[in-house]
Image: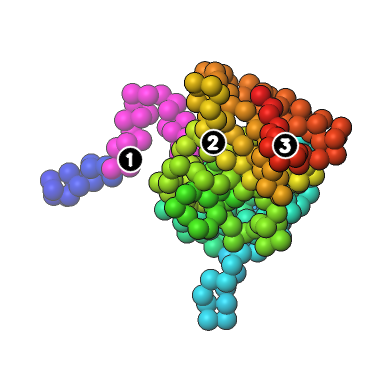
């Protein structure tokens, strides 16, 4: 036998070398290493199988909350909203349905807002989706009709219950330069007039002769004028009783008292008779809650006067004052 042939026979394969080293220097580790590798491969297999099973589970209809509907030509045709339920928050608790003054289903708006996000190009939404509730909350907070998100719960089979406090229209406001009116809520935020039933728009109190022009009148924007904010809160203090008192408008006026000139808020009845509500809250450091409480107390005085006299229309030359 040649020397070269003898050398080839004496050479070991790489795997044999590894086993020899393990057996020589780490007694018993060869079996442990094999078991470790087998365990790792088993775990990887389990994870891959679970991922595949998870996709199958999430595609099941009992987990699908909503789907993007398509027309025959493949174009988007809205959303399936049957599994999303909105509840209205009131002082008495949550109630089913939407307020009478919202002539719009805001569920579709919320899904459009969510889909507009960079990561929101989904065709369906599973209740198992990561961050589902946070995505809905973020979309609701920017919707112009939502004042506050009270809570969101998800259920299986797929269903979402959302409880929100809706913004409520308070006044139709007009500046000195405007011919039309703008709709405001209690926070002096603009609301979409197209969403309000026409018969309700005609009945809302009028805030007239405002001094300032708002920077933006888009839905959700705030009219940053302290006089407007005060006037809106005064009207809100009356609530539904405004109509029963036969009141029509409110405006900020200047009243002369001897040598003093004071800013007051004047209400007028439907027959044009003035009712002096008095000054706004003099302590501007008072909390919003304290201001609202003061306006409610004065509103109660007017309500009591109407209860005792049956009207706020006084004789010519007289003026009702409630400071």
In the rendering, which numbered label is found on residue 16? 1
Q: Helix, strand or loop at disc 3?
A: helix
Q: What secondary structure is the stretch in magenta mostly built from?
A: helix
C-alpha separation, residue under disc 3 versus residue under disc 1: 93 Å
Q: State the residue in front, 54 or 206.
A: 206
Q: State the residue in front, 66 or 322.
A: 322
Mark 1: few/some/many CA within 10 Å (<14, 14-19, 20+): few
Residue 115 position in % (x across, y down) = 50, 57
Name the N-terminal-most of marks 2 and 1: 1
Q: Residue furthest left?
A: 3
The magenta stretch spans which residues?
14-43
Q: Which residue is mark 3?
A: 238
Q: Is residue 103 visible?
A: no
Mark 2: few/some/many CA within 10 Å (<14, 14-19, 20+): some
Q: Residue furthest bottom?
A: 73
Measured along the vertical axis of the image, is residue 61 above or below residue 93?
Answer: below
Q: Is residue 298 visible?
A: yes
C-alpha separation, residue under disc 2 versus residue under disc 1: 101 Å
Q: Is residue 110 magenta?
A: no
Q: Helix, strand or loop at disc 1?
A: helix
Horizontally, is 86 left or right of 112 in the view? right
Mark 3: few/some/many CA within 10 Å (<14, 14-19, 20+): many
C-alpha separation, residue under disc 3 versus residue under disc 2: 20 Å
Image quarter for residue 234? top right
Q: Is residue 25 magenta?
A: yes
Residue drawn where x is 50% and y is 43% of the image = 210
In the rendering, which numbered label is found on residue 253? 2
Q: Between tags 2 and 1, which lies in front?
A: 2
């Amino acid at each position: 036998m040649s020397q070269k042939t003898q050398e080839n026979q004496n050479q070991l394969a790489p795997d044999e070398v590894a086993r020899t080293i393990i057996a020589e220097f780490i007694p018993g580790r060869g079996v442990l290493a094999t078991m470790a590798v087998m365990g790792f491969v088993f775990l990887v297999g389990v994870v891959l199988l679970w991922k595949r099973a998870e996709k199958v589970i999430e595609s099941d209809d009992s987990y699908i909350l909503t789907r993007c509907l398509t027309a025959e030509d493949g174009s988007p045709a809205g959303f399936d909203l049957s599994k999303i339920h909105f509840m209205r928050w009131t002082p008495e608790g949550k109630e089913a349905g939407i307020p009478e003054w919202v002539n719009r289903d805001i569920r579709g708006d919320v899904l459009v807002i969510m889909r507009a996000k960079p990561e929101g190009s989904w065709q369906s939404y599973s209740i198992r989706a990561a961050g589902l509730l946070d995505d809905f909350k973020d979309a609701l907070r920017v919707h112009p009709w939502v004042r506050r998100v009270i809570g969101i719960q998800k259920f299986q089979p797929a269903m979402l219950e959302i409880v929100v406090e809706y913004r409520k229209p308070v006044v139709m406001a007009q500046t000195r330069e405007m011919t039309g009116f703008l709709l405001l809520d209690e926070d002096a935020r603009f609301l979409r007039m197209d969403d309000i039933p026409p018969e309700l728009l005609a009945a809302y109190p009028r805030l007239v002769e405002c001094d300032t022009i708002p920077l933006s009148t888009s839905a959700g924007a705030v009219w940053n004028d302290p006089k407007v904010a005060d006037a809106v809160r005064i009207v809100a203090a009356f609530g539904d009783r405004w109509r029963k008192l036969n009141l029509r408008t409110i405006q900020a006026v200047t009243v002369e008292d001897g040598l003093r000139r004071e800013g007051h808020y004047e209400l007028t009845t439907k027959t044009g008779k003035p009712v002096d509500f008095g000054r706004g809250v003099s302590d501007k450091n008072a909390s919003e809650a304290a201001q609202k409480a003061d306006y409610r107390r004065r509103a109660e005085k007017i309500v009591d006067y109407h209860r005792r006299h049956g009207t706020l229309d006084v004789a010519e030359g007289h003026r009702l004052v409630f400071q």
